[in-house]
């Protein structure tokens, strides 16, 4: 498996962003780490090895990046206002520093597949919903989608703008129109440590009412909030993407793709 360590300059971050890239071609998949995680966590938990067939066959190319959660939402030494501002900085870092690097890496014209587990799923949903021109699909596994639990209920415009459960029922007409060409998968188990399944259901309901293509997939009461299950889930969804022809270096979702996928999900 091709594995490449890279650094990408970022003025907003204040130092280079470190990333790990796996593979040589295929659908570009931007992987957000779990809470306060690092770019190497996805590898350390064996996820690239789990989906090695897709990587080796040139079906997906992974870009595993850092979070700055410890500088933003989970920075207990900063005010809620400062935490929210730093979270918006992270969005700028991803969109202005990371995304151009990915697209120039052989993926011109492609929509990027966002993916993450646990708090990485929060980032997945947030980036997909706010930047539909960049991200055309997302696979969010076991996520929380309401950031207010880190802020003791504090709310201002910046918090609202970075909180999917707050803004998901108030998306602009223009954003909804763009999102109709995209596809968000929200998956959650209902077993041990799956504390945020209700938020997944709530987010999916908001998006469906707005006409945004979203597929909510709830797994069983034995399905825990843990890596062994996330390994099974990511393979399951990538296999479906593969059968639908979505895994290509230059693929961009459209409304017909997402509509077909949702309607025929269990037959794909």
Image (tube, rainbow, N blue to C red):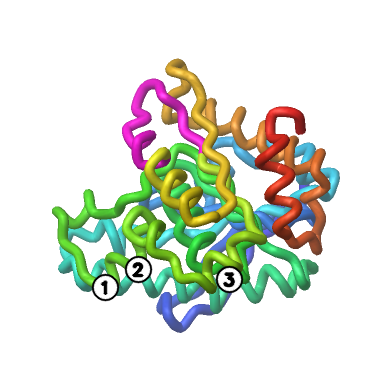
Q: Earlier in the sequence, mark 1 or mark 3?
A: 3
**Nearest to the observer: residue 56 or residue 116:** 116
Closest to the camera, between mark 2 and mark 3, is 2
Tell me what residue is drawn at x 40 percent, y 21 percent: 191
Residue 194 in view of the camera:
yes
In which quadrant of the rendered view does residue 164 lie? bottom left
Query: In this figure, which residue is indicated by the disc labeled 3?
Result: 98
Mark 1 neighbour class, 10 Å CA radius: few under 14, some 14 to 19, many 20 or more? few
In percent of width and height, residue 62 lies at: 67, 53
Mark found first going from the N terminus, 2 or 3 = 3
Expressed as whole percent of the image width and height from the top left, the position of residue 209 reads 46, 51
Q: Which mark is residue 145?
A: none
Q: Are the residues at dot 1 and dot 3 in contact (C-beta closer than 8 Å)?
A: no
Magenta stretch, residue numbers: 187-200
Question: Which residue is found at the position 41% from the left and 41% from the top?
Answer: 200
The residue under label 1 is 157
Callout 2: few (<14), some (14-19), or many (20+) C-alpha neighbours within 10 Å? some
> Which residue of the protein is positioned furthest toward the bottom in this rendering?
11
Q: Name the residue carrying label 2.
A: 161
Q: Are marks 1 and 2 in contact (CB under 8 Å)?
A: yes
Q: Would you say residue 34 is visible in this rendering?
A: no
Measured Cα–Cα span from mark 2 to mark 3: 21 Å
């Amino acid at each position: 498996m091709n594995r490449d360590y890279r650094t990408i300059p970022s003025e907003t971050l204040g130092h280079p962003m470190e990333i790990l890239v796996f593979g040589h071609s295929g659908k570009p998949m931007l992987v957000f780490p779990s809470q306060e995680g690092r770019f190497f966590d996805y590898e350390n938990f064996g996820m690239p090895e789990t989906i090695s067939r897709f990587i080796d066959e040139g079906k997906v190319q992974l870009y595993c990046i850092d979070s700055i959660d410890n500088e933003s939402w989970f920075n207990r030494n900063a005010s809620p206002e400062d935490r929210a501002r730093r979270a918006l900085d992270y969005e700028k870092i991803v969109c202005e520093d990371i995304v151009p690097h990915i697209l120039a890496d052989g993926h011109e014209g492609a929509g990027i597949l966002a993916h993450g587990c646990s708090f990485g799923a929060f980032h997945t949903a947030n980036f997909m919903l706010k930047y539909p021109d960049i991200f055309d699909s997302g696979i969010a596994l076991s996520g929380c989608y309401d950031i207010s639990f880190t802020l003791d209920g504090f709310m201002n415009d910046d918090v609202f703008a970075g909180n999917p459960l707050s803004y998901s029922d108030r998306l602009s007409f223009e954003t909804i129109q763009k999102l109709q060409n995209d596809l968000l998968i929200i998956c959650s188990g209902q077993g041990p440590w799956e504390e945020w399944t209700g938020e997944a259901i709530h987010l999916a309901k908001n998006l469906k009412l707005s006409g945004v293509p979203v597929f909510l997939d709830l797994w069983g009461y034995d399905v825990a909030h843990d890596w062994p299950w996330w390994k099974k889930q990511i393979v399951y969804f990538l296999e479906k993407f593969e059968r639908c022809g979505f895994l290509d270096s230059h693929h961009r979702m459209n409304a017909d793709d997402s509509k077909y996928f949702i309607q025929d999900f269990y037959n794909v």
